[in-house]
């Protein structure tokens, strides 16, 4: 039995290991797309900060991990899948036959509709290679523009700010991290960033990135690299409608023309190519929708990601925004499964299929797909969407249906001075979603309560009164007994 | 090194706070908490200042062992000039607040001035803020506690607050932390009230270190073993709490009853530890649910009780159906024996209200007892009390009185003056069972002679905790003395006073001394902080503290004439029990005591004494 | 033989000696805010509940770690490697028990690791509310069912349940 896994991220690696555990004799091939040892994108910000070296991003630390587990690591990317012949084609012209195939090719950054993306000094921040470029340019004091204050943007923000650059962040949505945080939390984050010396511009688009003498038509190294990972660049990617639909750069999805240009700041007189550029710099000028131009030596573009499904064209594997899977993570093609960012897995909260591009879900998918591939039918009941973000020391998190549901109850508690915020959403007497800023102790309990759907009983009202009593509510609810206390006399003596 | 080395100074008049280094020279001479803060107070304020005016200061102080794993190492004290007494006040409390202050990085907080409007203080490590308290002014301690935690979204905060009593400057109002642990005596709550400071909320995330961890772990472990193996601290206190004393003291004929007219209470057994543990007739459940510890305490003498939901005091009042701080011996005595009330549930309810509104149950119960006597004598009547029938033994009078006093409404305002002022107002000052204006605790000076001298000479007014000679006279710790004689009591009192001053300055609980001597404590202190801390040094520091407090009071205008007991103790002999026929022998003990102290016959420390103690 | 912390909240007095011992063992100072075991106070019900990691089999924290910084040792204990942890905090939201927490002063996460086989909290507990016992001898399964009811619910109703 030959299991072939496309993609060497957390989903792929977890699947490979699970298959090995389930079937000691199976042949396993793990096909990576980037020519790097399997690594975690989540660790890249910490690499940028210098907190870890590149090897610190590796998913498994032992050098011969894959060899030890008889997992063959092959170099991709894959250019096509032939589901009839049960084989995949590699870019180098070779092909690999499979008995079972897992597609875990992840996602790639989208290209927003901005002129001048393809020039030196403009980078996405998605791969180790991107990180290497950014590290070179993000020097202390250098003016840097970050396009996009979504989840990924906000993570990178921290590492850029820590590198000491002069940072400006531009977000098209009306607040930071609009997909993860509500208005109160997003704006709290913004105030925090501004306090920490980062300029944050929201409700503003980037029209163009202009450079001095930088040809905008030449493909840069970064762009080549990006294409190399994305097996088959999607021709639709420049269409803003699709980008927004897929990745919700703005949660409210207003059309760019409706953005109030002066909402975030008074519009200064328009500058253009004549913007003074510091000598010896990359000399970029970021032109905003409101007419302002900001000088930059580095522009980092983080406007969302999309699934890497282009190479499946013609394979007959059904795709939507990602690969369509059933509740066993099987695709429409026989013996082909999908997992991680590329798969439209089940969202536990909504019961619908959606892409939850987060590490724990990738691991869950990888495990479940592997169980199904190795003959233990295992149903996926859905993953919980959740995120945690550290923005210059202010930690925020969101869980499940933090926007609430019709007919549900909700509580918010805001303390602006100390940057603390909690929002809990209930459906009946169950917790279904939550959001926190500045609260980190025992926050996993939010997942515990949401995922188990335990009825909160009297604790719902107490939480509505005082959401910060989460730990008590959790222990009382999950452990049952402390609600009652001793009924008779109970003396604890030193022993 | 035991110390955080930092003092937080908060100026409420100007709304500022500053950090300053702890005066380590003073720390070496006065240890910490009670001693060190008293030194700061003595140096910084005029003892003649109005206790409820802006010139009084109030200090929340920890000891070097507060916030360590030394058993009971969680105490803090509130030091100020007491409005009830006009003397130096030092009220000690447990719970978790003191340790939290230490973890926030502060050895003590000195609060000065007077805020123009109600405020509360938050201390999140180095982040100190004076905030608007208009939303909680007029609310209880319990409401303030919940409100502060909720406002700052931090259930791990610990809050020390005053209730309505403190706001209204009830002269024996307390500062209550962790809902039912209190810096209870001398009206320290009223001082906060006078400063318009409702609460201090603390959350600390820092660590407390000690000088020599290895030695410290050994010393504290040795200490814990001693506590565990001792019958009082290992079994008696956790099982029965301080209430273990109710029947014992009653049998000793030393339970002041009905404003000190009697020394034995026929209802004692009904309000004793044994009664708390027995299933109630009404619902078959015991009043006592469990014992509870303060921070770091391996004894766990705290009582947690639940009132019978059907009892008249709490019918349709579910906020009092929860478990909360139950009766300790002093509260049970004051609310019960001193008033002649023997309804355990009513006493528990009254105690809950004392905690909820920040009232010292000792002074409150004793004041009600005095008022009952005035009522019986016809000096106050129903018209005066607003319909309250203040007769000895009236459960309803007691529970109504506490509600009124807590809210400073009606006759509650007069009760809030304390028994000295109340009895004086009605022309019978001798009926106040007080010294220096502060009500007696639960030991009758006729039945435990040492306690008479203890009360008379206590620097904060009548108090059992300044030299708990009951330990020796009744319980035989560290050695048995006869409670009915005066011989040797001056020396006993002095020794207890000096030792207790040191214990109160260390961060430890005085209850450890049922099992520990200073020999057990010295190695723990020595391993925690710089300096060579021996038993001798602790005793010397204790004596220095005692003299310093005395000198504060002398400067405030107190003289030997204030070292006296009420006439009743000196003239009316005990009617029953082992002490039958006895009055207090204070007049025999006091001169001897002054001499032993190295004081003049006027009760002033001589220059020799001051020099000897290097003050 | 596998051993586990057995917690009996009925014996807990709330003294927090466990938090002191834990923080001293792990941080070298007394600092309950950094303790891996936490005593929760249900004051209305007169109950204290010491609470820490049960070293659950699912190891949600471990699964969520992007850099393999959490491993299982031979005793089944989930251990965080400080040198590998990048402080991303994903484990802190992934652990449904809330027993792995971010330590802002080190930028890493902290959790109970049973002190390499001699838990300081159990040693320090004056009333034996926390004990460290051989799991076969102590009805640990029963206790685990109780203490880990959340875990059990996750197992039964969670996403990874085989059907």
Image (cartoon, coloured by chain):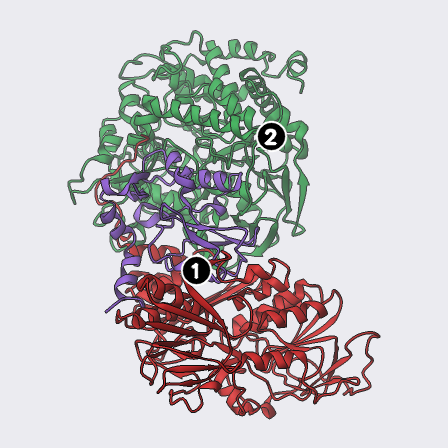
Q: Quadrant of residue A364?
A: bottom left
Please report, as a chain letter, where disc 2 is located: B
Residue at 34% across, 61% down: A21
Q: Is residue B329 left or right of residue B178?
A: left
Front residue of B40 and C112: C112
Total tally of numbered discs in the picture:
2
Q: Residue furthest front?
A: A94
Q: Is residue B401 left or right of residue A244?
A: left
Q: Residues within 10 Å of mark 2 (few under 14, many from 20)?
A: many
Residue receiving disc 1:
A443
Front residue of A440 and A330: A330
Residue at 50% across, 48% down: B167
Residue at 52% across, 72% down: A184
Q: Residue furthest right?
A: A279
Q: Which mark is residue A101?
A: none
Residue A291, placed above or below residue B214 = below
Q: Quadrant of residue C61?
A: bottom left
* Quadrant the C terminus of chain A occupies: top left
Which chain identifier belongs to the purple chain?
A: C
Front residue of B212 and C158: C158
* Quadrant the N terminus of chain A occupies: bottom left
Front residue of A255 and A283: A283
Residue receiving disc 2:
B36
Q: Is residue B438 left or right of residue B402?
A: right
Which chain identifier belongs to the green chain?
A: B
Q: Secondary structure at mark 1?
A: loop
Residue A325, placed above or below residue B96 = below
Residue B313 in the image: state x and y as whole percent. Answer: 27, 48
Which chain identifier belongs to the red chain?
A: A
Q: Residues within 10 Å of mark 1 (few under 14, many from 20)?
A: many
């Amino acid at each position: 039995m030959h299991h072939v896994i496309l993609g060497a991220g957390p989903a792929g690696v977890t699947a490979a290991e699970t298959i090995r555990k389930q079937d000691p004799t199976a042949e396993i091939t793990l096909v990576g797309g980037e020519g790097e040892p399997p690594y975690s994108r989540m660790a890249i910000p910490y690499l940028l900060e210098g907190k870890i070296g590149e090897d610190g991003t590796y998913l498994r630390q032992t050098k011969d991990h894959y060899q030890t587990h008889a997992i063959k690591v092959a170099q991709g990317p894959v250019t096509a899948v032939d589901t009839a012949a049960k084989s995949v084609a590699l870019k180098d012209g070779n092909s690999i036959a499979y008995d079972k195939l897992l597609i875990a090719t992840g996602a790639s950054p989208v290209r927003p509709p901005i002129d001048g993306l393809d020039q030196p000094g403009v980078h996405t921040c998605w791969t180790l290679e991107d990180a290497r470029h950014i590290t070179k340019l993000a020097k202390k004091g250098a003016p840097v523009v970050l396009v996009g204050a979504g989840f990924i943007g906000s993570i990178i923000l921290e590492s850029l700010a820590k590198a000491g650059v002069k940072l400006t962040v531009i977000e098209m949505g009306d607040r930071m991290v609009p997909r993860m945080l509500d208005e109160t939390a997003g704006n709290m984050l913004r105030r925090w960033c501004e306090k920490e010396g980062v300029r944050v511009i929201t409700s503003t688009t980037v029209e163009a990135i202009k450079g001095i003498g930088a040809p905008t038509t030449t493909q840069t190294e970064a762009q080549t690299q990006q294409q190399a990972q994305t097996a088959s660049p999607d021709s639709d990617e420049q269409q803003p409608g699709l980008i927004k639909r897929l990745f919700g750069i703005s949660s409210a999805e207003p059309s760019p023309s409706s953005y109030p240009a002066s909402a975030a700041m008074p519009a200064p007189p328009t500058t253009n190519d004549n913007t003074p550029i510091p000598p010896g710099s990359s000399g970029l000028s970021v032109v905003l929708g409101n007419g302002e131009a900001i000088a930059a030596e580095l522009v980092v573009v983080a406007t969302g990601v999309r699934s890497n499904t282009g190479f499946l064209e013609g394979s007959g594997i059904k795709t939507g925004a990602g690969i369509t899977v059933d509740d066993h993570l099987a695709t429409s093609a026989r013996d082909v499964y999908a997992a991680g960012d590329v798969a439209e897995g089940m969202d536990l909260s909504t019961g619908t299929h959606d892409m939850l591009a987060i590490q724990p879900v990738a691991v869950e998918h990888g495990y479940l797909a592997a169980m199904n591939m190795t003959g233990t039918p295992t149903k996926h009941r859905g993953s919980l969407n959740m995120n945690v973000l550290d923005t210059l020391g202010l930690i925020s998190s969101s869980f499940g249906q933090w926007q609430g549901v019709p007919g549900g109850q909700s509580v918010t508690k805001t303390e602006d001075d100390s940057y603390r915020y909690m929002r809990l959403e209930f459906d009946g007497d169950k917790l279904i979603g939550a959001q926190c800023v500045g609260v980190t102790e025992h926050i996993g309990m939010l997942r515990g309560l949401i995922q188990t759907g335990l009825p909160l009983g009297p604790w719902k009202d107490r939480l509505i009164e005082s959401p910060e009593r989460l730990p008590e509510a959790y222990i009382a609810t999950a452990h049952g007994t402390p609600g009652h206390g001793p009924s008779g006399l109970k003396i604890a003596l030193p022993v | 090194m035991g110390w955080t080395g930092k003092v937080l100074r908060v100026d409420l008049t100007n709304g500022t706070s500053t950090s300053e280094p702890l005066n380590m020279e003073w720390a070496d001479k006065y240890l910490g908490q009670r001693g060190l803060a008293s030194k700061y107070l003595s140096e910084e304020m005029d003892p003649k200042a109005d206790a409820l005016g802006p010139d009084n200061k109030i200090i929340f102080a920890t000891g070097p062992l507060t916030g360590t794993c030394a058993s009971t190492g969680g105490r803090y004290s509130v030091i100020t000039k007491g409005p009830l007494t006009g003397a130096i006040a030092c009220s000690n409390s447990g719970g978790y607040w003191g340790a939290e202050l230490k973890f926030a990085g502060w050895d003590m907080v000195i609060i000065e001035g007077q805020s123009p409007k109600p405020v509360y203080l938050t201390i999140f490590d180095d982040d100190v803020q004076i905030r608007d308290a208009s939303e909680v002014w007029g609310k209880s301690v319990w409401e303030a506690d919940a409100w502060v935690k909720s406002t700052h979204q931090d259930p791990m905060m610990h809050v020390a607050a005053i209730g309505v009593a403190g706001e209204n400057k009830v002269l024996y109002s307390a500062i209550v932390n962790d809902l039912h642990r209190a810096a209870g005596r001398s009206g320290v709550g009223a001082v906060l009230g006078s400063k318009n400071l409702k609460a201090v909320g603390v959350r600390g995330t820092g660590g407390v270190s000690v000088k020599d961890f290895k030695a410290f772990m050994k010393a504290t472990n040795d200490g814990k073993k001693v506590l565990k193996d001792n019958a009082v601290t290992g079994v008696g206190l956790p099982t029965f709490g301080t209430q273990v004393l109710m029947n014992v003291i009653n049998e000793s004929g030393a339970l002041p009853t009905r404003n000190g007219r009697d020394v034995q209470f026929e209802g004692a057994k009904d309000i004793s530890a044994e009664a708390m543990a027995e299933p109630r007739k009404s619902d078959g459940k015991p009043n006592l649910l469990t014992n509870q510890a303060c921070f770091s305490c391996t004894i766990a003498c705290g009582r947690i009780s639940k009132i019978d939901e059907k009892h008249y005091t709490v019918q349709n009042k579910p906020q009092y159906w929860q478990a909360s701080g139950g009766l300790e011996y002093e509260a049970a005595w004051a609310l019960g024996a001193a008033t002649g009330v023997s309804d355990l549930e009513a006493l528990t309810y009254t105690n809950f209200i004392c905690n909820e509104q920040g009232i010292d149950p000792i002074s409150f119960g004793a004041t009600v007892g005095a008022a009952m006597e005035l009522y019986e004598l016809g000096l106050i009547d129903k018209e005066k009390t607003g319909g309250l029938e203040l007769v000895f033994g009236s459960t309803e009078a007691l529970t109504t009185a506490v509600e009124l006093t807590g809210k400073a409404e009606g006759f509650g305002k007069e009760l809030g003056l304390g028994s000295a002022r109340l009895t004086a107002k009605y022309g019978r000052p001798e009926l106040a069972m007080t010294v220096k204006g502060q009500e007696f605790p639960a030991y009758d000076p006729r039945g435990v002679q040492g306690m008479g001298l203890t009360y008379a000479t206590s620097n904060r007014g009548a108090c059992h905790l300044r030299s708990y000679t009951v330990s020796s006279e009744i319980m035989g710790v560290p050695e048995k003395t006869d409670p009915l004689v005066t011989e040797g009591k001056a020396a006993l009192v002095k020794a207890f006073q000096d030792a207790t001053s040191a214990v109160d300055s260390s961060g430890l609980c005085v209850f450890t001394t049922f099992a520990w001597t200073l020999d057990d404590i010295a190695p723990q202190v020595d391993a925690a902080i710089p300096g060579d801390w021996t038993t001798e040094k602790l005793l010397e520091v204790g004596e220095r503290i005692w003299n310093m407090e005395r000198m504060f009071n002398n400067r405030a205008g107190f003289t030997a004439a204030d070292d006296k007991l009420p006439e009743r103790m000196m003239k009316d002999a005990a009617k029953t029990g082992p002490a039958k026929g006895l009055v207090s022998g204070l007049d025999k003990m006091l001169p001897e005591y002054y001499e032993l102290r190295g004081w003049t016959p006027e009760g002033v420390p001589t220059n020799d004494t001051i020099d000897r103690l290097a003050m | 033989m596998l051993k586990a912390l057995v917690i009996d909240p009925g014996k807990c007095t709330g003294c927090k000696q466990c938090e002191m011992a834990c923080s001293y063992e792990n941080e070298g100072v007394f600092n309950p805010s950094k303790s891996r075991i936490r005593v929760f106070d249900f004051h209305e019900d007169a109950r204290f509940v010491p609470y820490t990691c049960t070293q659950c089999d699912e190891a949600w924290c471990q699964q969520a770690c992007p850099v393999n910084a959490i491993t299982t040792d031979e005793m089944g204990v989930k251990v965080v490697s400080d040198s590998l942890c990048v402080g991303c905090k994903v484990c802190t939201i992934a652990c449904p028990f809330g027993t792995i927490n971010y330590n802002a002063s080190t930028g890493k996460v902290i959790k109970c690791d049973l002190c390499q086989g001699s838990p300081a909290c159990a040693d320090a507990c004056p009333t034996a509310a926390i004990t460290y016992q051989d799991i076969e001898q102590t009805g640990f399964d029963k206790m685990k069912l109780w203490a880990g009811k959340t875990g059990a619910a996750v197992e039964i109703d969670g996403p990874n349940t085989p059907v």
